[in-house]
Amino acid sequence: MHLLGENLTKHNLFVPKKHYGVLFETFILAEAEDGLYIIDQHTAHERIRYEEVLRDLKSKAYKSQSLLTPIRLELTREEAEEMIEERHRFLELGITLEPFSGGTILIREVPSYIDPGKETETILDLWERFKQKDPEERELYDEMAKCVACRSAIKKGDQVSDPIIGELLQRLSYCENPSLCPHGRPTLIKLTRKDLETMFHRI
Ligand SMILES: [Zn+2]
C-alpha cells in the first residue's frame, strides 16, 4: 500500500468519517458527512491503483529496473515478431524487450509500478488488449493502468484489516472519480440520511 501524496487535490464527493467493517468479505460499510456508503473493496481499490499508475506513467514518476535474470516470454514466431516491432511502445512504458530466438522474447527491464511477480501476465494482458484495438485508438497509458490495477487490487473475499480499510477509504476520497472503477463498474453506493428517513417513513 502506498501512502497518500501530499499534493493531491482533495475532492469532496466522498470523505470518509468512520467505517464499520466489511460485509460478505466484499462490501465496506462507511459513514461520511452526507450518508452511509457501501463500497466494493475490489472495484474501489482498482480505481485507486488505476489513477495512481496513470499519474505515475504520465509524469514518468517510476523507475525501470533491469532484471538480473531476464523473464522469458514464449510465443509463436509471428507473435514474437509483431511484439518486437512494437517494442518502442513498451519502452514508453518502461519495459525493455529483446528478441532472443524463434518465438522467445526476453523482458530485460520492468517498471516499478508493476507488482513484482506480475510482470509476465501484465505485459501479456496489455499485449492482448493492444492487438484488439486500431493503432490510433491505442491509449497506451490508459490500457496499462487498467491492466496493473486489475491485478494489484484486493479481490472480493480477501480479508482486509481495519487500518488497511481506513487507508483505502482515504485514498478513494482523493480519487478524481471515486465512484466508478476503470472498467465502468460502480465502486460505491450511497444512502443519504434523507433516503433512510424516507424508507422508515420518518418524513
Ligand atoms: Zn474494474
Image (cartoon, rainbow, N blue to C red):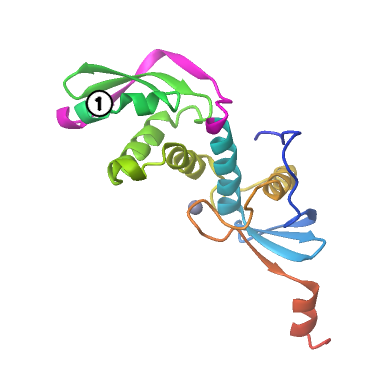
Quadrant in which the C terminus is drawn: bottom right
Q: Residue furthest top?
A: 68
Residue 104 at x, y percent in the picture? 23, 22
Q: Quadrant of the N terminus?
A: top right
**Beta carbon at label 1 within 8 Å of ligand 1:** no
Q: Quadrant of residue 19?
A: bottom right
Range drawn in magenta: 57-79
Locate residue 59: give its quadrant: top right
85 left or right of 164 in image: left
Across and down, in percent, residue 48 comes to 61, 44
Along the line of sight, the residue nearer the viewer: 47 or 86: 86
Q: Position of residue 185 (x, y in %)?
A: 52, 59
Which residue occupies 29% across, 28% down?
A: 86
User: Callout 1: few (<14), some (14-19), or many (20+) C-alpha neighbours within 10 Å?
Assistant: few
x 70%, y 48%: residue? 165
Magenta includes 164? no
SS of the residue under disc 1: helix
Q: Is residue 144 left or right of residue 57?
A: left
The count of marks equals 1
Name the residue beneath numbered marker 1: 85
Q: Amino acid at mark 1?
A: Glu
| Residue positioned 34% across, 24% down in the render | 88
Left or right: 98 in relation to 192: left
In magenta stretch: residue 61: yes
Describe residue 177's horizontal placement relative to residue 84 as left or right: right
Relative depth, front residue between 7 and 64: 7
Residue at image point 55% right, 26% down:
60
